[in-house]
Image (cartoon, coloured by chain):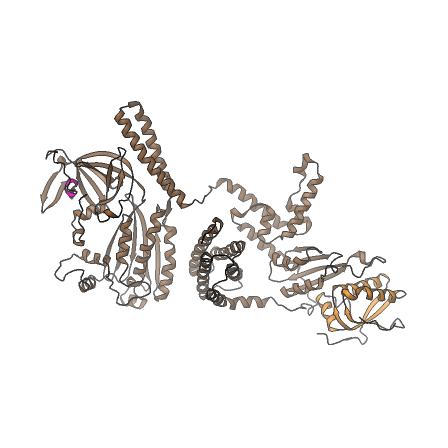
Chain colours: A brown, B orange
Amino acid sequence: MSLDSAREAFLAEVAELLQSMEDALLALEDDPKDPESLNEVFRAMHTIKGTGGVFGYDSIVDFTHTVETLMDQVRSGQVPLTRPLIAALFECRDHTARLVEAIVEASTPEAPLDPELARAGDALLAQLSPSGKAARATAPSTAAPSAADPKYLPVVSDLWMITLKFKHDTFRDGMDPLSFLRYLGSLGDLVHVTTLLDPEATREDGFDPESCYLHFGIGFRGEVDKPTLAGVFEFADQDCEIRILEPDTAQSKYLELLAAVPDDQVGWIGDLLLRIGALTQGELDRALETQAAESGEASDGEEAERKRRIGEILIEQGSIKPAVVEQAARTQEAVRTRRQEEAHFIRVDAQRLGHLIDLIGELVTSSAAIRVLVKRAGVEDMNEVIDGVEYLVSEIRDNALQLRMVPIGESLSRFKRVVRDASRELSKEIELVITGGETELDKTVVEKMIDPLTHLIRNAIDHGIETPEVRRSHGKPSQGTVRINAYHDSGHIVVEIADDGAGLDAERIRAKAEAVGLVKSDDVLTREETLRLIFAAGLSTKEQATNLSGRGVGMDVVRRNIEALRGTVELDSHLGEGTLVTIVLPLTLAIIDGFLVSAGPDQYVIPLAQVAECVEMGAASGIKRHGEHYINLRGEVLPFIRLTELFENADPRRRAGRRESLVVVRFGHHKMGLVVDALLGELQTVIKPLGKVFERLRGVAGATILGTGDIALILDVAELAAIAEGQRDSAGKRPVVT
Amino acid sequence: MNAQPECPTDTDPLVLDGELTIYTAAETAARLRAHLAERRVCALDLSGISELDGAGLQLLLWLHETLRARGGTLRLVAYSPVVAEVLSLLHLTAQFDLDSAGATVGGAS
């Protein structure tokens, strides 16, 4: 299956629209009257219908059309927006997504719709239809209406004024003017009809019975828009001069619509009026012809001035009322000024961006290489130039990475739906509170983070939050709360998922872990270690597996996914009070600022953001104790690791007692020291993954190529901290010697 | 449509029946012209009309206008439901008011 770029754009657009529709529906659940959200749902359906139509996806057009019609009625207050209706609209949104999916999978757009899908769609529409039918019933479809009430005086303001001047050849073209009027009658009330003969007919001998001289003036009342009415007379277009003038009520609707036209859709005034349905294509064409004809008459020099405005011609032509044209002109003007002020957004293929960042990575490495060469050659004059180049490269790097940064909130908002659906299914009352949605991080990190996050949130809903009855009996509010909070912390992003639910029962985890053989009954574990067990494979304390979670897979997958992103996940929980899961992830996967150190013959890079300070070893007193090192730094006891001991690569030629340096690194609330032989300074670091062979290597996040062509290992401070505290040893993973 | 025999006097209505459409318009117009030649008042019996379209209606309007221009009138003494439907659709029922003297609308709704 191959998609051309237009279809791909269509799919992207649909995905976006469906997302905003979902957000709007969620908002409507809180406030069913919110006009903006109503518009949003309508707009989503309307636009999908339109674009779907362009591609000939009839199944989408048919389905969305019905929903759009309903939304229109909801907007105008004809149909009340009830909770069941919102629920049905959610279903409709999902169904639209499925339709689009089906199209993506189908080889050709003409491929017939899967009958099951079609049935599902019909069933959904049937859910909407009680209201739909009611609305249709309000438009009476009697063939000969209103004559029953001849005394009725037309109130001009809410009537459509339609004039039809049939041309002589109408009958000869096989057209019967009466059939158009009958059809019009089926759409609403012909409140007022004036039938006239062209004066030509009554002239002496001027009457040809086979020519048509009929003119009609019609006052029409019905729930229709202008394009619909124009459609009635579409076939008569050649044989009839048609004017349709909207009622005052419709006019005020146009004025509203005009004020609300999205900026990017404002073009020519004619198109604008066409778009909101105030004008038909035929009317516009006619006016344009008039304009062209007039300017043709004018001499070339003054053409521009003589050319009348299209709006003027339209008013004169009787196609539209002046007030509408004025508003359209105002909208046009407002947008023109706004456009100049606004920044433009460009949609860029993520792959291109990725490629750019790769190239910048190479550039960083190259500029480091130049720096080394210049140093070796000892050309002092060039240092300044090199400094400039490096500054520029780092600026380019930051800017390029910034391009990929997206606020995490966009991705988090999808969880509102997850929480909503899940809480329905489980009959729980749950509120999702998202804070820090504006926190930015690399899009690739966001994407990889969504799955683990989904899992954690489902866990919170399913295992964490209790049913309302249970919550009340424990003296908690019946509505549970799940909180997602995101913030930046020293080059990392921290995402917290907290619930105020039942919390984890350490004893049950312990019992379960013993049952599956993860721990022995005589092992001594701290509370934290016990809680951490739920990240081990095959452990679920939920007695009954539900659809959502609890099948014993999950938390271990969550941990693996997060660790694959060089992040960590921690968990804290108090029985009866709730659970807090903290995920810490690097902001980006590609390039970081590093601090280069050497230990033994090798060089290592420590992420600069995690370096707290550098101290000379002699300035503090080290105490060796129980095989672990602790240091007293200004009264604070710090654990520390000697890198040469960790990697067992001490240089035998190096004499003991030579000066060493201590790099104090922090990670979250942990702090520790790394003892190194020499500090080599800051550098920009392109992170290269180490590949499968070194997967089990702990304490190292990746490698980077230095300007000299040497390779330096990038240290994973979090893992080093774990090693220092001896925590990981119980999991059976020890640092491996390089 | 079938033309009935000539109507002898002014007051006797001209009877049109069958189709009054574009297919019979020319023929009917010729008859009406002949009929109108020396009259200012005309009465029509349309109770036998089985079909009426825009051309047929136009013919009636033309007749009406022509007579009015001469200061005369057009009277409909009777019409069929088909005619009633068209007149009501166009709100012409009042204009073509039935002759109050014993006119019948054949089962018009």
Percent position of residue A4, x then y? 48, 50
Question: Is residue A637 visible in this depiction of the protein?
Answer: no
Specify whether B8 is left or right of A444: right
Q: Is residue B107 above or below residue A469?
A: below
Percent position of residue A58, x then y? 53, 59
Q: Is residue A645 magenta?
A: yes
Specify whether A481 is left or right of A208: left
Percent position of residue A473, x then y? 28, 68
Look at the image and give the residue range highlighted in magenta. Answer: A643-653
Quadrant where the C terminus of chain A sits is top left
The front one of B50 and A695 is A695
Q: Is residue B22 magenta?
A: no
Q: Is residue A594 above or below residue A266?
A: above
The residue under the point 69% across, 60% down is A218
The residue under the point 83% across, 62% down is B66
Specify whether A505 is left or right of A423: left
Q: How many numbered marks does the figure carry?
A: 0
Q: Is residue A179 above or below residue A396?
A: below
Locate residue A358: give its quadrant.
top left
Question: Is residue B26 visible in this depiction of the protein?
Answer: yes
Locate residue A515: give its quadrant.
bottom left
Q: In terms of secondary structure, what is the magenta stretch mainly?
A: loop
Percent position of residue A98, x then y? 44, 60
Quadrant where the N terminus of chain A sits is bottom left
Locate residue A87: give its quadrant.
bottom left
Specify whether A724 is left or right of A551: left
The front one of A340 and A169 is A169
